[in-house]
Structures are given as structure tokens and as C-alpha cells.
Image (cartoon, grey):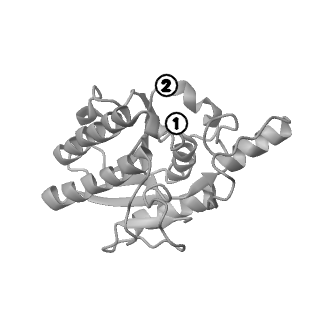
Amino acid sequence: MNLILFGAAGFIGKNLAINLAKNIEDTITLVDTSKEYFNDIKNELRENIVIKEDNIDEHTDFGSLLAGQDIVYHLVSTTAPTTSNQYIALELEKNLIVTVYMLEACIRNKIKKIIFFSSGGTVYGKDAVCPIGEDTLTYPICSYGLQKVSIEKLLYLYWYMHGLDYRVIRLANPYGPYQRPNGSLGAVTTFTYKALKDEEIVVYGDGSVVRDFIYIDDVIKAVENIVKNKNEYRIFNVGC
């Protein structure tokens, strides 16, 4: 099989790539803006890994990148949940329109399946009752959640029109190896890093919000099972 990961330089993409590459019969193509972003895992990568540089935007030649591929992993997101409402127009343009270009190229290249990493919390909004079921109505209150739900609907549309198989993984808050400790995402990693450096920890809201967290190894196992599983379900909550 030929597998391609868009947005592969994030910590989810890196852990996923390391796991996928264990099957030496598969060829794994990693796409992100710079090959240097993979330097921290270069000792983990095998000969069946191919790295390609691309900004993954409206100028991307998805047709060439997807030629000969079988399964697509869509991990691209240009903004973070905490700041997304500040850039709503830009967020929708950079994520939805680019995804449409990707899906059109998937159809032309007869891609067998696309795996999209959605959000396990922001798609539901503030009125969801735990535990959250996959059939819970989605009322996102931030544009990050809105663009995730919109891409889910686009996937359904392309399945309905063209038969493009897909899986949506609504993921809770993952943490683990290769997550940036000094970034804007990942409370477990960021808070631990700041505590070790005796720096201020910033908590948004009044502190009453509860979040689910899941270790990245468990995420990867769940993704592997979801991709291999052949059933009618297409949306999966993981860790939420």
C-alpha cells in the first residue's frame, strides 16, 4: 500500500508515521512545509519513508502528490482552538477550500480511503452531555470546531457523489512524545514544561472546564483499528 500524510510534521503525524512505517511493505509519504521538521525523528524513520516539502495551500499540486497513493491521512489545520475566533475568514479559507482541492484530486486519482483528524470537543459545543456519542448534534462555538465539522460534511458529500470512502476521527486532547512543550497546544505537555521551568501557567476561562486527555500511543492503536475495520461506521470518538 502507498500511504500519504498531509500535515505530517505535527506530533500526531510523527507518531503515526513511525507506526505506519513498521510495515515495510508499505510506502509512507510525509508532506509538510519543511523536511527539517522531521529531524527529531530521523532515527525512527525507515527506508520506506518519503518526505516531501509543500505548504499545503491553494497552490499545492495535489494531483501529483496523490498519484499512485491508496490511503490519505488529512492532519492539516492552520490554527489553534484558543485563537481561531480571531481569524474566522482566514481559517475557513485556508482549511475548507484547500480540503476541497484535496478531495477533487482524491477522486481523480481513485484514492481508496481518506482519514480525517477532526476534534473530539470543539465540534460539539457547550451543551453536549458526557459521555459523548458520535450521534450527538454538533454546535461548535469556535471557528476551529466549525471548520472541522464542515470538512466532515465535505467528506460525506464526496462519498455520496463519488463513493470516496472515509473515516473521521474526533480526537480528544492527545499528549506524548514529540509534542512541543513550548507551543500553544497540549496542556499536559505545556503545563509540565512550565512547571519544570518555574514559569507561569495560563489557564483560559474560570478553571471549571473539564477536558479529556489521551496518550498518543493509545491514539495510534485506535487509528490503526479504525482504518482496518470494515463496517458502515465512518465517525469515531477517540478519547472523549
- Residue 68 placement (x, y as % from top left): 27, 43
Q: Taking 156 as reference, is 81 left or right? A: right
- Residue depicted at 32% across the width and 55% down the height: 152
- Reading the image, the residue beneath label 2 is 34
In the image, residue 34 sits, relative to residue 12, either above or below, namely: above
Q: Is residue 112 visible in the rendered structure shown here?
A: no
Q: Measured from the top left, where is residue 143 in percent x and y?
A: 40, 44
- Label 2 sits on what residue type? Ser
Q: Position of residue 134 (x, y in %)?
A: 41, 70
Q: Which numbered dot is residue 224?
A: none
State the residue position of label 1.
9
Which three-letter amino acid code belongs to the residue tagged 1? Ala
Residue closer to the observer: 221 or 103: 103
Q: Is residue 132 left or right of residue 62?
A: right
Q: Position of residue 60 (x, y in %)?
A: 30, 28
Q: Are marks 1 and 2 in contact (CB under 8 Å)?
A: yes
Residue occupying the point 53% across, 50% down:
16
Mark 1 or 2 closer to N-term? 1
